[in-house]
Amino acid sequence: MKERFKITPAVYLILIKDGKILLQRRYNTGYFDGYYSLPAGHLDGNETFKQAMAREAKEETGIDLDVADLELVHVMNRKIPENERADFFFTAKNWIGEPKITESDKCDDLSWFDLNNLPDNIIPYIKQAINSFSNNIIYSECEGEKK
């Protein structure tokens, strides 16, 4: 029997406050260290995408999200050398708590950036997703890079 194709699902949080977006700088992860990304993570299994997003937001920023407040705003099919990814980008208008670094072994900065003035050191596919979000583009594709 032929083995089915597998794809890795991940969730990302686009958190906006006063026209600014929350970004975290990767540190000591082995993947795009020194570059900004969104709070994100992979599904653990036996959870919905929204549940995974709420869990990851709590783990990485300390904020609490109600899954009912999460809105899917972008999906990206990302092809990288090892495997393909299905990236789901959510936003939330409401959350409880003030975002802070909760995984200092993986993140060395957590800051709000103007949506029209993103840092130069942002992961390219993350910048693509943010631009897609800003332009109400629901789906995009990306030939992923490995760094």
Image (spheres, grey):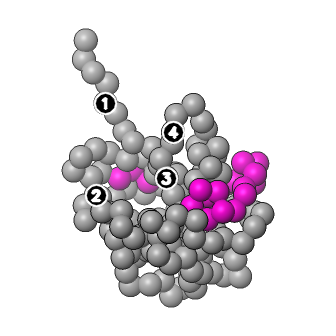
Mark 3 and mark 4 residues within 8 Å of each other at the beta carbon: no
Mark 2: give few (<14), some (14-19) or many (20+) Cα within 10 Å.
Answer: few
Residue 37 seen anywhere in this rendered image of the structure = no
**Residue at (24%, 46%) from the top-left corner?**
82
Where, quadrant-wise, is the C terminus in this rendering? bottom left
Mark 3: give few (<14), some (14-19) or many (20+) Cα within 10 Å.
Answer: some
Measure how far apart labels 3 and 4 are at the Cα level: 9 Å
Measure how far apart labels 3 and 2 are at the Cα level: 19 Å
Residue 5 got which mark? 1
Q: In this view, does 70 lie above or below 43?
A: below
Residue 65 got which mark? none
Mark 1: give few (<14), some (14-19) or many (20+) Cα within 10 Å.
Answer: few
Mark 4: give few (<14), some (14-19) or many (20+) Cα within 10 Å.
Answer: few
Disc 3 target residue: 41
**Residue at (27%, 52%) from the top-left corner?**
80
The span shown in magenta is 57-78
Q: Is residue 67 above or below residue 128?
A: above
